[in-house]
Amino acid sequence: MESKLKVSAPQFLHCPLCGFEFEKQETPCQHGCPLGRFCKLVCCPNCRYEFPEKTQGLNVLQRLFHRGRKPAPDRTLLGLHELEEGEHSELVCLNSSRASRRNALAVYGLTPGSRLILQQKRPTFVVRVGETELALEIEIAREILVRRV
Amino acid sequence: MPMPCHENNAVSTAGRKTATTQPMLVLVGNPNVGKSVLFNKLTGKFVIISNYPGTTVEIARGGTFIDDKEFTVLDTPGVNEFAPRTEDARVTCDVLRDYPEATVVQVADAKNLRRALLLTLQLAELRRPMVLVLNLMDELDKCGGRIDVRKLSEILGVPVVPTIAIAGTGVHLLQQAIGRARIPSLPSDAPGSRPCPTEIEAQLARANAILAQVYTITQPRHASFAQKLGWWATHPIKGLALAALVLYFTFWFVGLLGAGTAVGFFEKVVFGRYINPWAIQVVDIVLPFPHTHDTQESHYNLEIPLSPTYGISIWENTQIVSAPTYSLAPSATLGGWTQVRRLAHDFLVGEYGVITMALSYSLAIVLPIVTTFFLVFSVLEDSGYLSRLAVMLNRLFRGMGLNGKAVLPMVLGLGCDTMATMTTRILETRKERVITTLLLALAVPCSAQLGVLMAMMASISIRAVVFWIILMVLISFIIGWLAAKLYGGETSDFILELPPMRQPHLGNVVAKTFARLEWYLKEVIPLFVLGTMVLFILDKLRVLDKIARFGEPLVTGWLGLPRETASAFLIGFLRRDYGAVFLLDAATGPKHLLTPHQVLVAMVTLTLFMPCIATLFMISRELGKKTAFWITMFIFPFAFFVGGLVNHLGGLFGI
Ligand SMILES: Nc1nc2c(ncn2[C@@H]2O[C@H](COP(=O)(O)OP(=O)(O)OP(=O)(O)O)[C@@H](O)[C@H]2O)c(=O)[nH]1
Ligand SMILES: [Mg+2]
Ligand SMILES: [Zn+2]
Ligand SMILES: [Zn+2]
């Protein structure tokens, strides 16, 4: 289970220059940008090309253009926070290192196999499991790995 | 399942002695499933029932007769699992441990059978006779679910009783079933189950297996209006609009109708025209000495308020009434006994009299404000809105080392800080409990205090009121933030179950309001009478003067107030609003001791005082003497500190 998680965990970046695919955390390049860790540029570990990571604004724009199209139900593993409001999904596993958090979710019926409906994302996530409506923060939503249905 | 319950708990050990004599029923189950409603139907005893998880935080006990046998019934706080995370869940665990011979009545939400079964499986390991109650059957019907009750009973090996507790349906069936309570006889493992990593997951797999056999959902669900309202309430924009609407309505009902119209009626008509003059008359007959009371013109205008400045007048009239102030007959020389009579007369109906001041204050002002507030609050509680408010405010509370769950005790604090302090039990970490308690004690006045403080400041200037509100909010955030930093440690996860939006029951709203009023008045009236007495005695013994001189550096030097106001702060230790009443007397009374700036300084200082002495006792009971001590040691100096700042810097804001 664990290894599968790693592979499918999102945050993959694509270098526009050489086409190399890498994880964001792997960026080894350090440069003297005054913005420090707030700098939005990432650096390709293969060719050392620096390019901007997709920003929030870009995301919104893209979503605007793609609005009419429904995303095809794909089978990749996603964090709950990556779903859109109103999407249905099936819980695959709770990727939390803390047993107490897993338990806290389990008692509300959030266990592998259960069907979730993401009702809202802001200001706080609200998911529906059966007849239970549960509010939770994004930090927890990230650890709930689901698959669209 | 291990029962990691801790040994010490004052609540459950209190009644342990009576345990052996009578057969006992313990109501347990998930939060917000109707345990307390069922308890009320079984025993006839009143307990607070609200539509959010975590209403009951303490055990309630009552008696019921089943087949001419008397049973003790215990209502417990709701739990989701028998590994206590919070203080209220611990109470439930302790009950199960302390009464090993009790019959367990598990109350389940029929719509959420899976979660209930999880508890059933954990309870089964205790090997106690039990009965399973499927409550909220009406809501199960509405959402199109069906449960095969007989099959479920067969699988679990215990009686299963469907009920609609709120309507009383099925309660007698439950009573009949008590005799048939059995130890659950579960098949050791559900067929086809695979080994699971954790115990709880194993139990859930078994619960699923059972669910598959007994639960069917027939019709597709359409979102009802209540459900949509619930969604709006947590929507980032619609939610804000709804919150504004709720706030305005609360303000209209409590602030204008309660604190304006109703207080005016009680103060001016009921007390001003009837009770006070009547009491003066009676006292004058019983305790005669040569004097004549002043008279005053009492003008009254009954109106329905539409905005703070405009209302529809219904009834208006003017009448001459006698006042507590009097003048002695010019030639009179008062002998020994006459002096005593005069003293007693003043104590009862004088300017600081128990009747003319203490009672008319605590009843005429407090009663209408608190009643209207509790009414609105009960409606909000029963609707399920409060938990949704917690969702909206979670971010904000994160900044103070808390999370959205702390919204509930904070809002409850507007009703009564003492009750709210107890409700902090629903918070998961001690850090959160301490910070919430501190903020409650520091900056959340209960509705009566809020009403009094605002009314008094409004009589000075509206700008001062606005400044005061902003200051209090700012202080809450800064102190909360600092406390979180100092306390360190992590804030618990925000995982909050949202109860379904429900239509409030008028009966429950009224019953709850009455119960809370009773609680409140029992706490408030003796305190105020005590405060008045202390002040009266100090005044007559001329000790007030000494105290005033003692407090001079602080009161006059730092706060810039006349030394006579020291007594107001003294009485403010009992309840902050009483201090305010005495201050106002100084401000608007005949002597005009205070300037508007001074009133603001004094009010800010008093607002930051401990809400009332009863709250202090509750803090020490809930969090221990040491924490209570430190909270007190922080609050009072801090109050004077901020008051002084306002005094010295207030000029900068033009207040
Ligand atoms: N429609 C319906 N509502 C019910 C029924 N039983 C209880 N309720 C409502 O459910 C809510 C919760 O009831 P409580 O008795 O306070 O629940 P509890 O189990 O004691 O909750 P905690 O003390 O928080 O654990 C209240 O708003 C009740 O009006 C029922 O049979 N039908
Ligand atoms: Mg209860
Ligand atoms: Zn850079
Ligand atoms: Zn008199």
Image (tube, coloured by chain):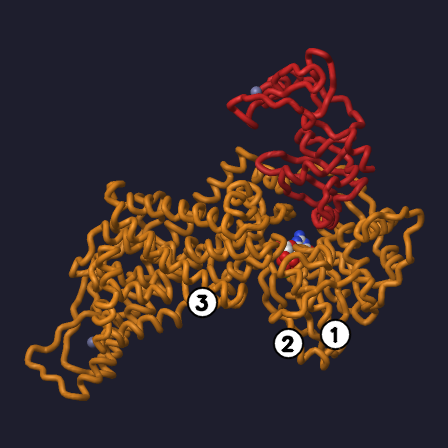
Chain colours: A red, B orange
The quadrant of the rendering that contains the N terminus of chain A is: top right
Residue under the image location 55 percent in, 22 percent down:
A32
Name the residue carrying label 3: B614
- Farthest right residue? B191
- Please report, as a chain letter, where disc 1 is located: B
Looking at the image, residue B326 lies above or below residue A120: below
Foreground: disc 1 or disc 2: 2
Give the image location of residue B60, x and y in percent: 62, 68
Label 2 SS: loop
Relative to A127, does residue A59 appear above or below in the rendering? Answer: above
- From the viewer's perspective, is the residue at label 1 or at label 3 nearer? 3
> What kind of residue is marked 1?
Ile
Tell me if mark 3 has few (under 14), some (14-19) or many (20+) residues whose alpha carbon lies within 10 angstroms of its own: some
The percent position of residue B309, horizontal first and vertical second, equals: 30, 44
Using the rendered view, name the quadrant where residue B89 is placed: bottom right
**Label 1, label 2: how far apart the Cα atoms are:** 22 Å
The reply to whether the residue tagged 2 has its Cβ within 8 angstroms of ligand 2 is: no
Residue B213, position in %: x, y?
Answer: 88, 49
Work out how far the residue at label 1 is from the one at label 3, CA to CA, in angstroms: 39 Å
- Chain under callout 3: B
Q: How crowded is mark 1: few (under 14 residues within 10 Å), some or many (20 or more)?
A: some
Say which residue label 1 marks: B66
Q: Which amino acid type is shown beneath numbered disc 3?
A: Ala
Instruction: Point out which mark residue B15 bears.
Output: 2
Some atom of ligand 2 lies within 8 Å of the CB belonging to the residue at label 3? no
**One can see residue B500 in this view:** no
For this rendering, which residue is in front, B481 or B416?
B481
- Marks 1 and 2: CB-CB under 8 Å? no
The disc, 1 or 3, on the residue closer to the chain's N-terminal end is 1
| Mark 2 residue type | Gly
